[in-house]
Each structure stands twice: as structure tokens, then as C-alpha cells.
Image (cartoon, helix red, strand yellow):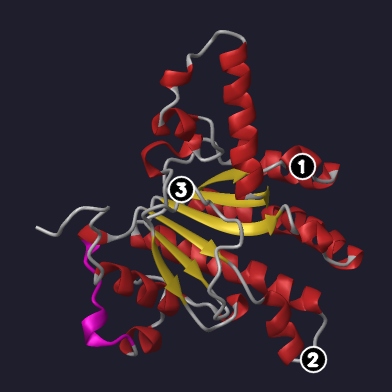
């Protein structure tokens, strides 16, 4: 299972961390936190952390795919991140261009399909072009979905969904009593993920314990794993640890354990 680990790293995995292959979370969502702090600790500019963070994305994507994860959602840029210094935002907008240019061949090799959710029409044109090309180039892949939340915010997503539903009611296409949780699901940005639209587990790096406006509707019954390392330090071994913790939880979805 751990083909992406070298023999030395495999030897360091605790015996009790033998994952149940029948209980791998189908959808893992990660709040990739701590790039800037990782860089500052090393007296580097914050953008160096973002660059290293993209390298981590490549490693974790391959690891998640090898483990049998169906959807890996990565919180790459929020609707609130525009508040950051212009130089940092400009750098972040260039990252997808470089990332997809170098990584798409590997994604195709591993049968990974790219999906992007968020207000991508508000991104710079070059960023939009890179995103759209990656989606097009990987559309035939049938393995794991690498789902980027890019210029995404959950409150904005829910607001947009409510506006659309209200318009449908106003236009007579929908009756108020037809508005169900399933209907709302169909109007959210995760709709294209089908049965895997809701994360089984949410991982946040850097030790912070906040949701930060991420998938507020979809994570109603997700498990949460908060981990201390900053995102550039995140490794396949830490991913295995998070999944191991998930597998030792009992998910009751509001009911009682059998």
C-alpha cells in the first residue's frame, strides 16, 4: 500500500498503524495552513513557504491516490485571502500556472482528475487558463479527484446557492416546500463530486483549530484531525497518521453505535 515510502520510512511506521484498506476515507479535505510561518521560522520570505507548499501538494496527492482516496480537496486560496499583501497574492496567483505546467503529466500517469471549485472567474486570466487546461487535460482520468478550493469561501458559496434557489422559486420553477437538504446539495460547488461531496475527514495543519470558512455545509458530520506541523512539513507518514486516527473513531451521524 505504501509504495511512495522508501524502505527506511516504511520501517518507522508503528505496527499499530496498519491501515484498514476497507476503511480508507473516501473524501479527505485539507486546510493547508502554515506556509508563511514555516518560511518565517527559516528567515525566508513568505512566498518561499507557498512554493514549498506546492511541492508538498504533489507528494500528498500521490500518497492519497495510492491509498485509495476517492477525492482529495485542498483549500488553496480563500475569498478572504485577497486581503493579504499584493505581492503575496500575485505570487499565489502564479503558483497554479507553474504547478499544473509541471505536475499534470504526473497526474495523468496516476489517473488523477483535476477539479476546481470557487469563484474562478475572478482570478487573473493566466490563472484561469492554467486551471481550465488542467481540467481539460485530465478529464479522461477515472481515479482520484484532486479538488482545489480556489478563491473559495463557504459563506459566499451558500449565499450564491440561496440566491439561485430564490430565483427559481420566484420564476415558478420551484415551490418553497421543495427546498430540501438534497436540493441545497445540488446547488453547492461540491455537486459535481456526487456521492463523495461531503468530506469524511478534515485535516488542518499548523496547529490551528479553526474551520476558516471551509465547506461549512458539507462538513456537518466530518471527523476533524488537527496536526501541529506546518503544511510544507506535511508528509505521507503524517497523512497515514491522520487516517489511522480517523479509523479509530466511531461515526454515529447523530445516532447510536450498534
| Crowd tier of the residue under label 3, counting other residues whose Cα lies within 10 Å: few below 14, some 14–19, many 20 or above | some
* Secondary structure under the numbered disc 3 in the rendered image: loop
Q: Residue at x 36, y 77 (%)?
A: 241
In the picture as drawn, the residue positioned furthest to the right comes out as: 86
> Residue 128 — which label?
1
Span highlighted in magenta in the image: 13-21
- Residue 184 appears left or right of 16: right
Relative to the observer, which residue lies in front, 95 or 168?
168
Tell us which disc is closer to us: 3 or 1.
3
Relative to the observer, which residue lies in front, 159 or 243?
159
- Residue 141 appears left or right of 83: left
Quadrant, the N terminus: bottom left
| Crowd tier of the residue under label 1, counting other residues whose Cα lies within 10 Å: few below 14, some 14–19, many 20 or above | some
Q: Is residue 211 visible?
A: yes
Residue at mark 3 to residue at mark 1: CA–CA distance: 25 Å
Q: Position of residue 216 (x, y in %)?
A: 52, 51
| Crowd tier of the residue under label 2, counting other residues whose Cα lies within 10 Å: few below 14, some 14–19, many 20 or above | few
In the picture as drawn, the residue positioned furthest to the top comes out as: 172
Relative to the observer, which residue lies in front, 254 or 236?
254
Give the mark nearer the N terminus: 1 vs 2: 2
Q: Residue at x 76, y 42 (%)?
A: 128
Residue named by callout 2? 43
**Magenta stretch holds residue 204:** no
Q: Say if mark 1 contacts mark 2, CB within 8 Å.
A: no
Amino acid at each position: 500500500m505504501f509504495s511512495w515510502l522508501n524502505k527506511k520510512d516504511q520501517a518507522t511506521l508503528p505496527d499499530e498503524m496498519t491501515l484498514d484498506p476497507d476503511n480508507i476515507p473516501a473524501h479527505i479535505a485539507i486546510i493547508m495552513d502554515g506556509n508563511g510561518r514555516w518560511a518565517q521560522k527559516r528567515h525566508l520570505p513568505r512566498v518561499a513557504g507557498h512554493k514549498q507548499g506546492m511541492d508538498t501538494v504533489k507528494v500528498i496527492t500521490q500518497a492519497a491516490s495510492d491509498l485509495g482516496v476517492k477525492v482529495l480537496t485542498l483549500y488553496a486560496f480563500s475569498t478572504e485571502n485577497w486581503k493579504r499583501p499584493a505581492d503575496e497574492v500575485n505570487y499565489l496567483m502564479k503558483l497554479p500556472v507553474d504547478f499544473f505546467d509541471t505536475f499534470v503529466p504526473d497526474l495523468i500517469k496516476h489517473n488523477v482528475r483535476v477539479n476546481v471549485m470557487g469563484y474562478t472567474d475572478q482570478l487573473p486570466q493566466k490563472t484561469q487558463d492554467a486551471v481550465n487546461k488542467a481540467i481539460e487535460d485530465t478529464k479522461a482520468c477515472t481515479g482520484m479527484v484532486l479538488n482545489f478550493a480556489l478563491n473559495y469561501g463557504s459563506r459566499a458559496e451558500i449565499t450564491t446557492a440561496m440566491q439561485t434557489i430564490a430565483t427559481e422559486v420566484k420564476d415558478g420553477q420551484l415551490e418553497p416546500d421543495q427546498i430540501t437538504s438534497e436540493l441545497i446539495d445540488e446547488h453547492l460547488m461540491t455537486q459535481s463530486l456526487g456521492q463523495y461531496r461531503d468530506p469524511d475527514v478534515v485535516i488542518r495543519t499548523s496547529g490551528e483549530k479553526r474551520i476558516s470558512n471551509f465547506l461549512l455545509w458539507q462538513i456537518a458530520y466530518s471527523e476533524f484531525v488537527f496536526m501541529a506541523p506546518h503544511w510544507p512539513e506535511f508528509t505521507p507518514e503524517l497523512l497515514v497518521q491522520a487516517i489511522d486516527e480517523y479509523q479509530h473513531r466511531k461515526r454515529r451521524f447523530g445516532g447510536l453505535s450498534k
